[in-house]
Amino acid sequence: MQDASLMLNRRAVVRELLRERGELLLVAGLGAAAWDITAAGDQSRNFPLWGAMGGAAVLGLGLALAQPSRKVLVITGDGEMLMGIGSLATIAVQRPHNLRIVVLDNERYGETGRQRTHTASGTDLGAVARACGFPHVRTVCAENEIEGLRSDIHQMDDLFLAVVKVALTDDPLVLPPRDGAYLKDRTRGAILGPDSILR
Amino acid sequence: MTTTMNQPTDHSTSRHWASDIYDVFKAQGIGIVSYVPDAGHTKLINLCESDPEIRAVTLTTEEEGVALAAGAYLGGKRAALLMQSSGVGNCINMLSLVRTCSFPFLSLITMRGEWGEFNPWQVPMGQGTPAALAAMGIIVERVAEARDVRDTVLAATKLAFNSYRGVAVLLSQRLIGAKQFLE
């Protein structure tokens, strides 16, 4: 059984975090995180992954380093983050002030039959991030903490990671575009202008 | 044991081939260089780390560099990934990103497990490197002579960024010199 304290609904959390997001650039890890951001509204500043497991956070690092004047948010799941756990050290060492990572932690591999991830057995990704050198880490378990997190995504001028403990839910699939070349070009177009893809 | 294999085979130029790669990086606007270090890349890493215009990013595993380069390109920056041939296997699934999204991707790979190798543990991945890259759709170039490094890396960089493909340049162990464990 999933821990009964995991009450937050991931779709509601993501919808709230992305409310009035403005120019925020968004990378989502494969699986439920990609469906969640798409359910909140697909758009050109979204770069949802359909694969490359373990790469979401460090892809966000590359984007954040390339675009230091823009805020970059990575939303991913606990299984995806565990596969890229070493990248937390890489990211902390670089400490990009404009990168923020939100891990939606339901303690399960949701897409593959709800097998337990290590976070179900006590692995604390927030503690891992802190030990890697993340300057700001928080674990969010309650609805009244979401607005503060949303505000920090836009206001905070430093690297941070938030683990949001979410319930195991059966959400309808809301799929983003699958064509990777299209996703790449539309995001580049949104950031760099149409010349970046037409020239 | 002989020490002659420690030296680059081409003595016709006093300039180190790593400086030629660095010059190509500068001319081609490479702004982020990530790596898991290899002894063969030491000079190039030092050049990049001392350049304020290049962001040098140390990785915990090579596949991070694939995703990092993709993110950088989304934001309009060119990246290069430096690694040893043993790191190629770590990258395989992440290279899906390059192929599926048509990301330009440039990697310079110092070879182990071939010319004069001392460590048998390096041989399987070293020998498997070209096939592993090719299996993921990466174009593979090889350079064995110091005098060819500049042109090969320049051509690879242009190919990658002009044709939206992954290109790897294998820097042969003969060029770098086999690692010496014994005198």
Image (spheres, grey):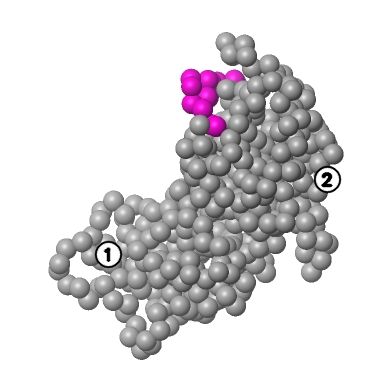
B131 relative to A106, above or below: below
Assign the C terminus of chain A to one quadrant of the image.
bottom right
Q: Find numbered disc 1 in the image and state the secondary structure of the residue it sits on.
A: loop
Residue A117 falls within the magenta-colored stretch: yes
Q: CA distance from mark 2 to mark 1?
A: 53 Å
Q: Residue at 32% of width from left, 63% of height from top? A: B114
- Disc ID at residue B179: 1
The residue identified by callout 2 is A22
Identity of the amino acid at label 2? Answer: Gly
Q: What kind of residue is marked 1?
A: Lys
Residue B139 visible in the current orientation = no
* Residue A73 visible here: yes
Q: Residue at horizontal 47%, vertical 58%?
A: B35
Q: Is residue A66 left or right of residue B51?
A: right
Q: Position of residue B23 (x, y in %)?
A: 53, 78
What's the magenta region? A114-126
